[in-house]
Structure formats: C-alpha cells, structure tokens
C-alpha cells in the first residue's frame, strides 16, 4: 500500500510556485495578486482565510483582505465584486463562503468575472470545465487531480465510484474523471444519500473518491483488493485523545481500508493540504491570463 502524502506534495508544489513567481518578478513583472473577501466572523471562515493569507505570503503572492461586518448589504458586496472585476491590479479573488443569510451566495458568485474566479464557482467556469475548455477548477478537485498525476495513478478505463454529489467536490470530480485527458477516461458511478446498496457499488470500484462527510463511513469490507481510495472527508469529532478535545476524521475507516488498497490518502495529511495550494495555483494561472 502506498500512502498518498498530501503534505509533501503541497510542499513540493509550493517550491515550484515560488520559482515561477521569481521568474515573473525577475523580469520586472508584478507578483500575482489575490483578494479575499470575508464577511462576518464565522470562526471556520476566519481560520481558512488566515491560512490562505499565510500561504500567499510564503510563496510571494500578494494578498489583500477585504473584511466586512456581518451586516454588510448585498448591494455593497455586489459593488465590491464589481470594483474587483475592474481592478487591473487584482488577478483573482474569492468571496469566502458561507455568506450571511440576507445575501444570495449565487447572486454574488454570478457577479464575479469568470476570468478572476479563482475558486472556479462561477457557472461559466463550471460549464467550461464540463466541456473541457480552459477554466479555473475548484481547489479540492484540482488538488485531488494533482495527487493522481504526481503519484502516476492509472485512470484509463478504471471504474471510479464517487461518494457525494456536491457542487464543489462530487460533481466536478465526476466530470473531470470522465474527460478524455489524463487523469480521466474513467467509467463512473456517483453514489449519494438516495443510492441503494452503496457497498455493492464500492466493491466494484478501482478508484473510490469519498466526499460525504460521514466519519469512517467506508469500511474494509466495502473495498476490493488493490483499489485506490481518496478520502475527502474532514469531520471534527470530539476526542479525548487530543488536548484540543477534538480530532479530524475522514470518510474512511483507515485501519481497515488501508490494508486492501494499492494507494490511499489519509486524513489529515491527504487531500486537505492540497486545497489552499490549488487556490494559489489558480491565482498564478489568473496572473498569467491563461483563462480567457
Ligand atoms: N468556504 C469553504 N471552502 C471554501 C472555498 O473553497 N472557497 C470559498 N470561497 N469559500 C469556502
């Protein structure tokens, strides 16, 4: 069994990004510039944003934080998006989600220029991804693809079972794995909370990508020998093992499943560390104006 090390891979990509940014700035170009819009004080959002800003600094991406109170109006936020769309100094930006209930997330997402939508949430980017045009791929699927590529995991003709059909993981992963380019050419099954007999489907899978957020859902007897298992779940559960009083658990019962796998990504240290670095990769693509 080979452990897919997301921490080491993210570290390697970080070095590659640093090198690429140096090449831009050595020629007198401006470094990539990401803006992050944060609304309110949701503690998870604050932690994500702090981590995004930290990694930007580490790799030489300029990062501007725009922080509004929870009471900010939808029209004010739309005006900010409009300004960012027009600002030539900003290569890409994200609106950290979730937004307060009085603001329509969909309306805000759709107001972002798809050329600066480094989250890849705008319907134009989603549509372009589906038909295989240049686009920003959302961070988690992008990170998973990078892991598949860097570990040279064979995907052609493989049967891939995806657990979960969210817009930011399950659906994009399914679309990408169906593309004719590597890592793709898979035969796909998408399972969700209405699927009958998930175990039956999982047992046929060469590759399982699990993104359902149910801790330790995937057990050893649900996986065939030699399968590749990618665990996207990250659920905080109470635990006496750690001083913090909680522990991060994936969707996979690692001790059982790892024994049967050819490759497995752990939680923590698998897909998680890849997500912020994928956002930074997208910011670099935005800087290079690769998405047009
Ligand atoms: N909230 C949780 N994950 C994300 C993400 O990837 N992007 C944004 N904008 N908000 C999030």
Image: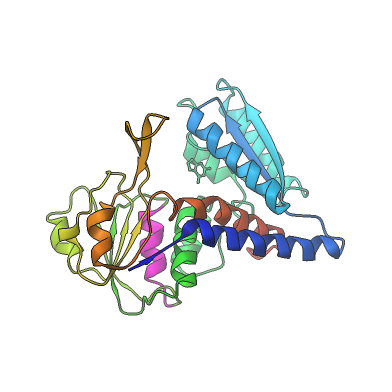
* Quarter of the view holding residue 288: bottom right
Give the extent of the magenta segment.
169-180
* 97 magenta-colored: no
Furthest residue toward top: 71
Residue at 20% across, 63% down: 223
Q: Where is residue 130 in the image (x, y as percent from the top left)?
A: 44, 64
Please name whichever residue, 290 or 113, is drawn nearer the observer in this view of the structure.
Answer: 290
**Magenta segment main secondary structure:** helix
Its colouring scheme is rainbow
Q: Is residue 167 left or right of residue 39?
A: left
Picture residue at 65% right of the left edge, 55% below the top? 283
Residue 100 image position (x, y, % from top left):
49, 27
Q: How many labels does the image show?
A: 0
Give above or below for 114 relative to 45.
below
Q: Along the line of sight, which residue is nearer the eye, 214 or 191?
A: 214
Q: Quadrant of the C terminus?
A: bottom right
Residue that appears at 72% across and 64% down: 19
């Amino acid at each position: 069994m080979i452990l897919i090390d997301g921490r080491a891979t993210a570290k390697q990509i970080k070095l590659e990004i640093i090198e690429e940014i140096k090449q831009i700035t050595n020629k007198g170009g401006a470094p990539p510039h990401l803006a992050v819009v944060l609304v309110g004080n949701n503690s998870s959002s604050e932690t994500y944003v702090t981590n995004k800003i930290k990694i930007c600094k580490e790799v030489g991406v300029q990062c501007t934080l725009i922080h509004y109170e929870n009471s900010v109006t939808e029209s004010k936020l739309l005006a900010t998006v409009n300004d960012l769309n027009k600002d030539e100094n900003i290569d890409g930006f994200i609106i950290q989600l979730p937004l307060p209930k009085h603001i329509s997330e969909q309306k805000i997402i759709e107001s972002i220029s798809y050329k600066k939508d480094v989250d890849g949430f705008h319907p134009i980017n989603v549509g372009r991804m589906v038909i295989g045009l240049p686009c920003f791929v959302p961070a988690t699927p992008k990170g998973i693809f990078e892991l598949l590529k860097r570990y040279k995991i064979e995907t052609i003709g493989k049967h891939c079972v995806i657990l979960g059909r969210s817009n930011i993981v399950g659906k994009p992963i399914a679309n990408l794995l169906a593309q004719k380019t590597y890592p793709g050419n898979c035969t796909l099954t998408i399972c969700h909370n209405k699927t009958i007999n998930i175990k039956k489907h999982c047992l046929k899978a060469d590759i399982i990508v699990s993104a359902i957020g149910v801790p330790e859902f995937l057990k050893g007897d649900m996986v065939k020998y030699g399968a590749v298992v990618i665990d996207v779940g990250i659920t905080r559960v109470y635990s006496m093992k750690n001083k913090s009083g909680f522990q991060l658990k994936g969707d996979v019962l690692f001790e059982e499943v790892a024994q049967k796998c050819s490759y497995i990504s752990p939680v923590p240290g698998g897909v998680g560390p890849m997500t912020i670095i994928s956002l930074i990769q997208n910011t670099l693509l935005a800087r290079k104006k690769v998405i047009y």
